[in-house]
Amino acid sequence: MFNKNTDKIRIAILEISDQNDAILDYYFSTAGKSLYTLVDKNEADAFITDYDYPGAVDHWEELRKTSKNPVIVLSISEKNLPNSVWLAKPLSSKAITDAAVEIRKLLESVESVESVESVESVESVESVESVESVESVESVQDETLESHIAQEQVPEIQILENTTSENIEEESAEDLLIQSLKFEDESESIQSESQQTLYAQSSKPAEEKAESSKTSSIPVKELAMSGSALSFDFDDFFETETEEQLEKGGESVKHDDVEKIESDFDIFNEVIEAGERPFATTDSSGDDISIEDNSVADDSLVAEKSLVADDDLVSLEEPVAEESVAENPVIEDKPEIQDASHENIEVLEMTDADEVDALLASLIQGEGTKKHEEEFTDELDITSFEDTKANDIAANLEESIELINPETPIDEDLIELDDEKEQKKANQTNLSKEETLEESLLTVEESLTLAEISLEEAEVEALAEDSLSVENSLPIEDSLTVEGSLTVEGSLLTEDSLTEELSLSLEKPSEEPAPKAEKPAVEVKDFLAHDDSMDFEEPFVIEESLDAVEPKESLIIEDVVMQEAPVLDPDENTFVDTLEIETKDISADIHTIETETQPPSEEEMEAKLEEDLFNFDLDSLQLDESSKRVSVEEDGSSINLMDVHVDELDEEDLPDNLDINIDNTIKKSTAKAEKALIDIQMGEITDIGLSTDALIPDTEISSEDKSNAAEIELQSLLNEIRKEADKSSAPASSSTQETKIEYDKTVAEKRWALLCGDKDNKDSKDNYYRLNQHMLAVLLDQIEVAKEDSKKVLRLKHNDIIIVINAGSESIYCNYSVDTEEFVNFCFNTVNPDNFKIHDLDYSEVKLYQTKSVENPENAHSFESFIWTVSLLTSRGRLLEHTDLNKKIGLKTWPNITRIESFPHLMNIAAVFSKHPGSLKDVPQWLNIPECYVYAFYNAAMALNMIEFNSNNLKPSKFAFKLNASTEKKKERGFFGRLIQKLKS
Amino acid sequence: MSKTEMINKKIIFTGPVGAGKTTAIQTMSDIPIICTNEEASDMTKDRKPQTTVAMDYGRINIGNKEKIHLYGTPGQERFSFMWDILTKGALGLILLLDNSRDNPQQDLRFYLQSFSKFIQEGDLIIGVTRMDEQQTPNINDYRKWLKEFSVAAPVFTVDARERQDVSSLVQALLYSLDPGIAA
């Protein structure tokens, strides 16, 4: 008997072309070695023939007559020949490997049919003839006779059905045959169906493969003629695994395992013989019978190989949790497959063969389910419901508290609930977090209401970020106490969840935007402070000028407080009004409580006013001439931070003829002032652009003007600007510009020094360097490696510096900018090449770095620009070891100068080497430039393989370069020089 | 140079339609450029609505009397009769190639052949535009093609709208003409 799990397919090559013969020979000796054995025709299980070969069709007919063995048919066009597998030409290794699976199926079919002959339960000659008729179904011509024979063996088959086949029943060819015998009227059609099935299986393997596992398993099983359980072919049940193993190279299930399974099945048969059906269940349709082998002693095997023949294959790979078994106890009277699966899972968890047997026995006695249910229940060790409930309540309570105060959890001991039952009840309803919060807030609310809340003791802050804070100020009242700090995010609080007293106070802070820290005065100050290019003698003059301010507008604040304070009525709306005041005061950044409880001294008030004025949004300072009120509105809102009638101010504090809109003046003047500052900075100012009309007279700040802080601030700012403008009028302006240019030059020169070395150092001892001691060597090597495969992307990592080389796009990404000190040192300093970690990036990593390159374009480079820069930073004007200064060299091609880092005389040097080959010693002399620039160019160009060393390739230039040019040439040179000066400017 | 002597030189910008010749001249010119643009009526309109039919003209002034005249040739081949007229007496040729066109190599070959006579006597600088839009062929491909055509000329990636880039082309041309220019 051919064992598809263990045996190789013995195959013989018939008529075939030399080319395909060679291919097959090679395949059978290499990849197909584990699947096929090339044998003589007489010993073969299967054949290979070329259907396109001359005379192949005749040969095929002959072959079919002499052998029933499956054939691999090679043909260019698809061939649906019975009992064959078509392989398209040209052949591929994979196709032949896949064909092995199909051939095995066909062989199995043949074997299965033949095995029926030895089935003890089918003893009658008619039945044997019937089986044979199935075997030779394609050659059967007399369908009527066939049908008649089939009718005659109905009783035998029915007996079979009632005994063994009942337990093994599945959609097999046997079923179809049985059906055909049962229903005489349909016998012909059923047999035809069976024949078609067999034909379809043997001629359309490719179609079968394309089907799902569920449907693809059917044709094979249809041919599994089962005489008894003992002869039942287990392999059908392991079809999927076996196929997978075949695909993996022909590895089959270990023989020991098969024996084990068969042994297990013996136990199963004993159970069957006992007249019981422990796990065989039938679904409602009765078509499918599931057999679950619970008698398997080796649980590991069971875990891997499910003996579930039902189409709805119950997965045994993942055991279900015990709880689910307990929740869904197996009920014998309920034959649904899902219940059976639970039982099966139970058995899977058995580790001992005896235990399995015991279970089988108990199940036979109808006690197993109950017993195991109890066992599982015991194992679960479920605590009493009440205990669970209590735990849940405690957990929910804790969660509620945490929700109330997520940042500062309240100690559980501090919370005393007067009605514990009520709390438990609340928790039993499994409230959501929001509901729990609401509940908890209500509890807190009750506590707050009942408690004696003293306004003097309460300090409530409406925090800037929409939060409400009650800080350790609530008094304790017997058992109803809420002690400690309570902070609730404003966004979590709703109006409905709070008492009326609280609602208003919660609404306002959340709606009102927080006071903004952005104030023009501060901005201007920062602008001055952070602008390195500016060189003001007194950059913080504004601050200093304001230091001298002694504004009496502190009275305003006092008035605000005094106006608000009478509204307060601790007995009625204590909490509300306090919050309201706090909201306003916080917005204005004024400490109301302090003001209210302890009237500040005049000095303190002045200091506070000064602070407040700094924090005021100057854009919002308004003077309403009609109502004669000075107000400060918070930017973007209608909230009055300050609203004082001018009469309430000391009249002396205001200018005599305050006929200007302060707000607009501030806006315009500040904008102009800033623009003027920028102009000065850029060295482009000739006129500061501020008309004297707009300017406040340049007089010393009088005490009268101190009342208007914004005006004072503007005054000092503009004065400062004007001073600067005066200083840098015409000559000063040009000097500023020169300073800027000088600064730029300095920055550029510093960079050039890093790239090309010190131009004044001509005899440095460090004029040589070793390439293999620098990162450049590793970089160049890895670029070459990456270029070998254009799709390769490599990552070089040295400490925290990462360089990604993408050969496909010829681009490089470096996580450090080439301008950074780290990178400069990394290039210049010697490194150990062994310390580089080189990694071949996969697709996802490549995508990641591509994204980074897009996000940080300054870190993305072309090969050329990166190598150029790195080589410059590496050499820093030095030469490579053993460089011959006298050797004439040329330039193969110009570097892409528009996309590489530039340095002085770059184009001169490139043009000279390109047009007029010369030595490294000559060129600096010709051009009269520091040699470090020539060396730098040489190093960088050499790293890019642009230097031509071969003297044969060095052609004389069309325009001979002459040190002593003619007069005409000098004229032209002068013209070009001026032109270049213009172009560079 | 005497005070009365006036030096006038010209540089030619050439290249296929849409390569950026007019833009480059506009970028460098000290005067408003003179264009002979007409509405494109042929397939040129697929690339841009207007095209140069005779020439573009711009100028770089150096002092009061010294000038560099910048001429742009019409890109379309049918106006090639203008090319010889314009290149006569020019300092050098700046060839702009559009990397996003179908076959830049063919464009390169065409213009090298068309201006072969001038290239033998004068200098050539090549600028490749729109490399950011189309990364292939890359600059090394152009170098390789030039080697195949036995032409030694610098090739740079340029953006015709960027003064620095176009300036580099002109500077490279001037340094190629005389590497000894003192800058």
Image (spheres, coloured by chain):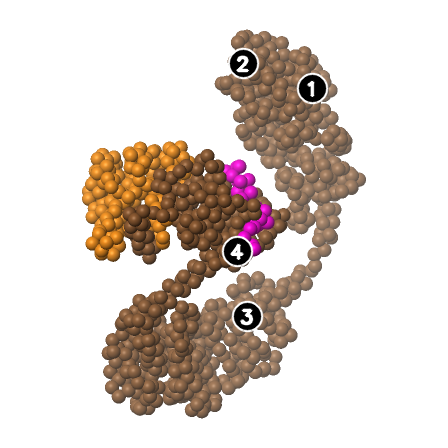
Chain colours: A brown, B orange
Q: Which residue is mark 2?
A: A51
Question: Magenta residues, as a range?
Answer: A765-792
Indicate which label's residue lies in the foreground, 3 or 2: 2
- Chain bearing tag 3 is A
Q: Amino acid at mark 2?
A: Tyr
- The reply to whether callout 4 and callout 2 are in contact (CB within 8 Å) is no
| Crowd rating for badge 2 (residues with CA inside 10 Å; few <14, some 14–19, many 20+) | many
Closer to the camera in the image, A738 or B33: A738
Q: Which residue is mark 1?
A: A115
| Crowd rating for badge 3 (residues with CA inside 10 Å; few <14, some 14–19, many 20+) | many
- The reply to whether callout 4 and callout 3 are in contact (CB within 8 Å) is no
Residue A404 numbered mark, or none: 3
Q: Secondary structure at mark 1?
A: helix
Q: Amino acid at mark 1?
A: Ser
- Of mark 1 and mark 4, the one earlier in the sequence is 1
- The reply to whether callout 3 and callout 2 are in contact (CB within 8 Å) is no
